[in-house]
Image (cartoon, grey):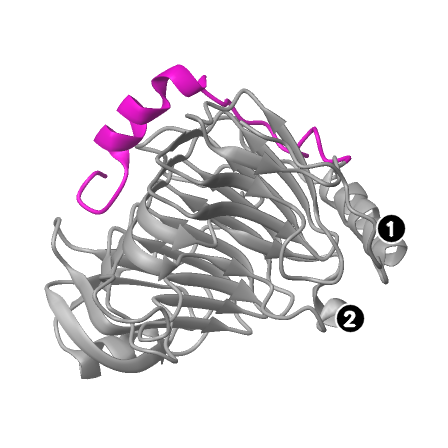
Amino acid sequence: MRTRPPRTRTRRLALALTTATAAALAVTTALVLPSSASAADTSPVGFGAGTTGGGGATAVTVSTLDAFKAAVTGDTAKVVRVNGLITLSGQVDIGSNATVLGVGSASGFTGGGLRLKKVTNVVVRNLHISKPLKPADGITVQASTKVWIDHNAFSSDRDHGKNYYDGLLDINHGSDYVTVSWNTFKDHYKGSLVGHSDNNASEDAGHLRVTYHHNWFDNVNSRIPSLRFGTGHFYDNYVVGADTAVHSRMGAQMLVENNVFRTTTVAVTTNRDSDVDGYANLRGNDLGGAATEISQVGTFTTPPYSYTAEPASSVVASVASGAGAGKL
């Protein structure tokens, strides 16, 4: 393992970003959040805690694109069960107070994805989401709050160039309070981008609070995740075959805890591709020989919620048996 020393570079916005992050965490600490995680959880742990989706609304089962679009519109509480694999062109917008749930182990969408834009309280679980052709992401979370992405199987292929598909899961435009748990991300170039631009501090600073836990990133090249401006907790994840995995930039604070990295070149970096470096704290990880590039050690060491992080020694077994669609 090598750790690169801090570099002398321009850090415009750094003080403002640090102040905004500290203020955001102070607000978050006041929340009352649940305690632990397991593969069978019925509610999210982490920043997305308290997300209920459609709750106890009567479920509607759909098997066609037209029926799905009709079922997920509006802000009334709804539970939409997707039965079978539906081909998309572009993205389908999901309304607030929604649960979208795949039926069985092989239901979901291919060719496009879902978009959560200016909505709140949305749960997406147990879906296969594959090959989202650019400019569509598998899931886009945009200007939205209280989101739980759980037990889905995201994938494409790496037979095309890195810009043939877009992101598998992108979170941007000031979105907040998101948990990403027990998903698989496979065979893709750009995994999960949080914060889309270096020039979006006015919208993103103090937001983009995201928890990733018990996810399996397999043959995903980078953005695992890439986080600008926000606050990220990345724990108990399994990363295999990445070039650059966790990427903290533009003053983002990342706590990287009890993860396992295999055949990965750089497990964590804070000093690539942006004018302002990010911050990272690492503890309990099994780097598997991967390098780290930590130019700035962060202040985010204690998440403002209760959780149980299992040791890295048991992560591979837990994630391999519990992550992905069909594991609920």
- Look at the image and tell me whether residue 253 can be seen: yes
Distance from label 2 to label 1 (Cα)?
A: 13 Å
Q: Nearer the viewer, residue 278 or 8?
A: 8
Write down the quadrant of residue 303 in the picture. Answer: top right
> Which residue carries the number 2 mark?
202
The residue drawn where x is 50% and y is 37% is 45
Write down the quadrant of residue 255 in the picture. Answer: top right
Q: Main secondary structure of the magenta part?
A: loop
Name which residue type carries label 1.
Answer: Thr
Q: Is residue 265 shown above or below 66?
A: above
Indicate the position of residue 82 as horizontal and vertical percent values: 19, 63
Q: Locate the C terminus by quadrant.
A: top left
- In the rendered structure, does residue 313 fall within the stretch colored magenta? yes
Name which residue type carries label 2.
Answer: Ser
Q: Is residue 119 shown above or below 323?
A: below
The earlier-in-sequence mark between 2 and 1 is: 1
- Look at the image and tell me whether residue 98 can be seen: no
- In the rendered structure, does residue 161 fall within the stretch colored magenta? no
The residue drawn where x is 29% and y is 77% is 133
Indicate the position of residue 99 as horizontal and vertical percent values: 35, 59
Magenta residues span 299-328
83 sits left or right of 274 in the view: left
Q: Nearer the viewer, residue 65 or 14?
A: 14
What label does residue 19 carry, if any?
Answer: 1
Write down the quadrant of residue 203 in the picture. Answer: bottom right
How would you rate the neighbour count of disc 1 (Cα within 10 Å): few for under 14, some for 14-19, many for 20 or more?
A: few
The residue drawn where x is 44% and y is 40% is 265
93 sits left or right of 4 in the view: left
